[in-house]
Image (spheres, rainbow, N blue to C red):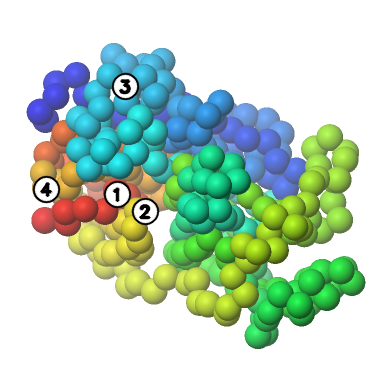
Amino acid sequence: MKTSNLYPLKFEPQLKEKVWGGTQLSEQFEKKAEGKIGESWEISGVQDSVSLVSNGVLAGKSLTELIHRFGSDLLGKDVARQFGNEFPLLFKFIDAKEDLSVQLHPDDTVAGERHNSFGKTEMWYVLHAEENARLILGFNQEMDKETYVNYLSKGKITQILNEVHVSRGDAFFIAPGTVHAIGAGVMLAEIQQTSDITYRIYDWDRPGMDGKMRELHTDLALDVIDFSRTDSQLKFTQKEDEETLICESPYFVTQFLKLSRDMKRDVSRIDSFLVYMCVDGEAQLNDVLLKNGETILIPACTERVDIHTQGATLLEVYIPGNDIK
């Protein structure tokens, strides 16, 4: 490791209560919270929700402080040049006891113009799905703006939504403009751009946590919706004890590691931080223990990741640039 003051960093989970949330994040992952916890923000640079380090000598320091102090040693030179002092990705675990709102997100251009924010490109990896659990992804028929507005105005939008039944291990890429919702009975890991901009178009006629109906963003959404029918599911074959590419986009690359034994990862050629989300079992990464439902950040100055395990499934994420060899 080139910078001795940096090491694999764990952060305090930020648990978000949601009207659609459940208890699985506490029960399955031992996240310490009560109530309807819908999201655990594992690593975040979102304003007012910036993560704090939970391990080692830097415990209590914010992610923002670390970026100012360590810069490219933490982020990578290319990442630091592109994003400055902003952390570009947001990592979450999500538990949907009930259906989330039907929604979509703007791209970088629209989000920048309207909200001074990054857009929101995201991917999902399904951790658990009850029998007949489903996601909503796009439309179930050829669609255009006029037809969509007609169904929406008549309160019949659910008739045109495309439902996809899911199982553990399924993965999906959600491009900006894609109408989507996580269905009841699904728990998943989410990797996304650093953005909290959501356009809600239907909320099941359900009041929010305060008893009031949540705001809909009908007009904002209208010129952002992608009406084309696209297949959002990511196809990959799970291979044991070797890396498997799940998702490659301009914003992040995600690899799948299903390990039954130790693995050494030479990451010296990648000019980015790496994040590992543990979605089964447990492992030690450079002597820091990572349990099921935990997330860790490997600074960009790290040249090798030694993974010690007798059984673990990890999602490995980084900002694209040079390939890992």
Chain-order first, disc 1 or disc 4: 4
Residue farthest toward the bottom in the current orientation of the protein: 142
Chain-order first, disc 2 or disc 4: 2
The amino acid type, in three-letter code, at marker 1 is Ile
Quadrant of the rendering where the N terminus is positioned: top left
Q: CA distance from mark 2 to mark 4?
A: 18 Å
Q: Secondary structure under badge 4? A: loop
Q: Indicate the position of residue 148 as horizontal and vertical percent values.
A: 75, 74
The amino acid type, in three-letter code, at marker 2 is Tyr
Residue labelled with disc 2: 251
* Residue drawn at point x = 70 percent, y = 55 percent: 220
* Residue drawn at point x = 28 percent, y = 19 percent: 69
Quadrant of the rendering where the C terminus is positioned: bottom left
Residue labelled with disc 3: 68
The picture quadrant where one finds residue 6 is top left
Residue labelled with disc 1: 319
Marks 1 & 2, CB-CB < 8 Å contact: yes
